[in-house]
Amino acid sequence: MPQPELNNYPHRRKNILTGEWVLVSPNRTNRPWQGEVFSPAKNERPQYDPNCYLCPGNIRANGEVNPNYDSTFVFTNDYSSLIEDIPASTKNKNDLIVAKSEKGICRVVNFSPRHDLTLAEMKEEEIENVITTWQNEFESLASNPVINHIQIFENKGSMMGNSNPHPHCQIWAQESIPAEPAKELKQFKKYYKKYKRSILSDYLKLETKLKERIVYENSSFSVVVPFWAVWPYETLIISKRKIANILQLKNNEKKDFANALSVTTIKYDNLFQTSFPYSSGLHQAPVDGKEYKEWHFHMHFYPPLLRSASIKKFMVGYEMMAEPQRDITPELSANILRGLHLIHYNNDLNSKTLFNK
């Protein structure tokens, strides 16, 4: 289909990372701001909250006292979804009722002692320090013989189920390779077997040539709204050099990754002048001791906001019963994100004009 038809008529797009499909219906609305628009909600928080169980020196929910940390702070989740020391067991009744035990470790990483600083308002060197912490935790967890996969992710904002507003992320390390990375691994292997190249390397070359969905790029990373995006302003950060995990980042690449994270989150906040909610996650090769030469490091951002700071895209009805569906095209989303300032609206002297001229 030529691009004009993709911009105007319903069609399905294939997610090359999972093999799944998304229905795109641009005929419903080619503009994301049709309908009612609400003013941004005030999101002012103090630098320190005495009632926050993640702030320095405060008592956590389990009674432990946080140290007076001045950088990142990592601890094992007080209410972990995965536990390392459990008995191994399985259950299988006629291949109809099937279960197996799952060992693992859940950690929490506070980005900063500041209760009010999200990634979007942190300095790039502070974000680089967060990446260093991710590397240290990844290396430590990968050395555990029980652990075969490590998922680093952030749920930002109450809209995404975040129970504590102090900026933080989580790391879940477990025995099995979870469903989403497993689907991606299957597609990585399939493409590599056929072409002897990384599927994301070839995809990024094509996107760079087309320049329709690239939001931002630096020497080491590209931020793109993927052709198959489901969420309204979904983005994918892809390393230009094929690496398997964050331990393989060179010093300049780590700086560039911090820059890409900063730009992406600033643009999100600037879109509706609000602390933009999202779920994000790093997808890295499994750590089960096998070689994954087909894997290519990338990071997903799934933000739910659609038309304003308070209008959310819900996955209901057709999305739950059939397959994902979106109204605005990824090309339009990319164009809007690309045009936004690189300066956070809280620091912009002319915050009412957030689009680049």
Image (cartoon, rainbow, N blue to C red):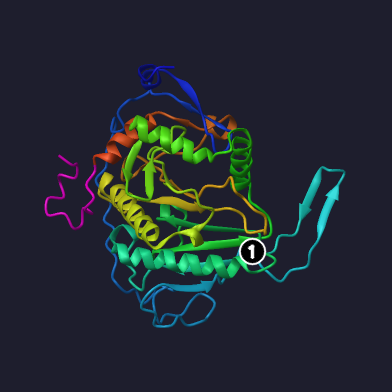
Relative height, residue 155 to residue 97 (above, below): below
x 30%, y 51%: residue: 263
> As rendered, which of 248 and 31 lies closer to the eye?
248
Classify residue 191 as left or right of residue 130: right
Specify the amino acid type for callout 1. Answer: Leu
- Place of residue 7 in the rendered image (x, y in percent of width and height, measured from the top left): 36, 22
Neighbour tally class for label 1: few under 14, some 14-19, many 20 plus, Cα within 10 Å: some
- Place of residue 120 in the rendered image (x, y in percent of width and height, measured from the top left): 31, 57
> As rendered, which of 56 and 61 lies closer to the eye?
56
- Place of residue 141 in the rendered image (x, y in percent of width and height, measured from the top left): 59, 67
x 20%, y 57%: residue: 346
Residue range of the region highlighted in magenta in the rendering = 340-357
Classify residue 349 as left or right of residue 89: left
Residue 356 placement: quadrant: top left
Relative height, residue 333 to residue 276 (above, below): above
Q: Farthest left residue?
A: 349
x 59%, y 35%: residue: 191
The answer to whether residue 298 is magenta is: no
The answer to whether residue 350 is magenta is: yes
Classify residue 33 as left or right of residue 254: left
Relative height, residue 22 to residue 300 (above, below): above
Residue 304 seen in this snapshot = yes
Q: How many marks?
A: 1
Task: Say which quadrant the C terminus sits in.
Answer: top left
> As rendered, which of 321 and 357 lies closer to the eye?
357
- Please give the residue where the numbered disc 1 appears in the rendered image: 82
